[in-house]
Image (cartoon, rainbow, N blue to C red):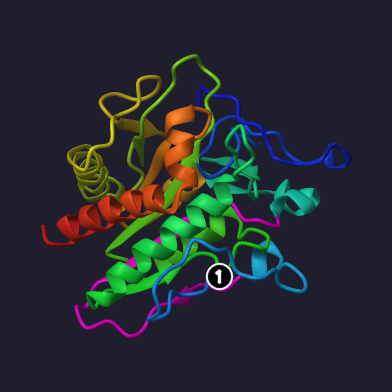
Amino acid sequence: MVAVRRAIVPLLLAGALLLTGCSDDAPAAVPATTLPPTSAAVTSSLPSPSPSPSSPSSVPPSSSAPATSGKVVVLDPGHNGGNAAHPAEINRPVPAGRGQTKPCNTTGTATNAGYPEHAFTFDVAQRVGKALADKGIRVVYTRQNDTGVGPCVDRRAAIGNEADADAVVSVHADGSEAAGATGFHVAYSSPALNAAQGAPSTQLARTLRDTLRTSGFTTANYIGTEGLSARADLAGLNLSTRPAALVECGNMRNATEAARMTSADGRQRYAAAIVAAIEAYLAL
């Protein structure tokens, strides 16, 4: 992505990866999971830290109660709260598709006041998952808390593939430093590497874009075209064999959007729009 993203890592962790933009990971180099929402209301508080973060390769997906609709949705909240403290693990190269490798994961960005992307994405994904599960849709998460490490981007894609998901939606927020950069955009894999990355994924991306726009969110003015961004460098999309799209909900460096993302009401607005989009896509 065009923006340079700041990793929220203390100076003593200088070895941790500095990000360029959000999405699933850092720019590719060319070579030779989560707790399900319960039936209780979703709160804005984060779960208590786990005794020791899971390694990126060992995080299992968790899923909601058995579905009644027959539909399966995989939700992929970007990054993880323990990534910053484990630079060696998240910097480890993994397959990224198109003959490339990328770091296992990244730390994500944050608002200027320090609210981290990983907390935002986890909260929004939980809200989305609860709403979908309440409608009888089976929900699978790629990470089970906001205190662990990873999972790696190739594993996140594998979780969607293994679940035979009808839709895979990654939730992120951007960290552009460009003056006046604002708005959301939706990324999809292009050129397509398989049938699912063709019409199904582009339709999912368009449905997310259209629904977020009709829900009152504005499309990005600094990246993509009318809220859509064709990407060949995102491992989670490249490696998916299911319809998949990645939502950058807005720019955390923009004061207005940062205030929205920091508030529980704002996160609920994002979640409601994503839920409506997923429902609309599944009904096609």
Q: Residue at x 71, y 72 (%)?
A: 50
Q: Is residue 251 visible?
A: no
Mark 1 falls on what kind of element?
loop
Q: Where the C terminus falls, by quadrant?
A: bottom left
Image height of 126 relative to 40, above or below: above
Q: Position of residue 280 (x, y in %)?
A: 15, 56
Please give left or right for residue 94 compared with residue 224 in the image.
Answer: right
Q: Is residue 191 magenta?
A: no
Q: Is residue 67 magenta?
A: yes
Image height of 145 relative to 247, above or below: below
Question: Badge 1: how crowded within 10 Å, few (<14), some, or many (20+)?
Answer: many
Q: Position of residue 219 (x, y in %)?
A: 29, 29
- Look at label 1 and name its amino acid: Gln
Please give left or right for residue 128 compared with residue 252 in the image.
Answer: left
Please name the residue that numbered disc 1 is placed on: 144
Q: How many marks?
A: 1
Where residue 268 sits, quadrant-wise, is: bottom left
Q: Residue at x 60, y 39 (%)?
A: 110
Q: Residue at x 40, y 79 (%)?
A: 40
Span colored in magenta: 59-82
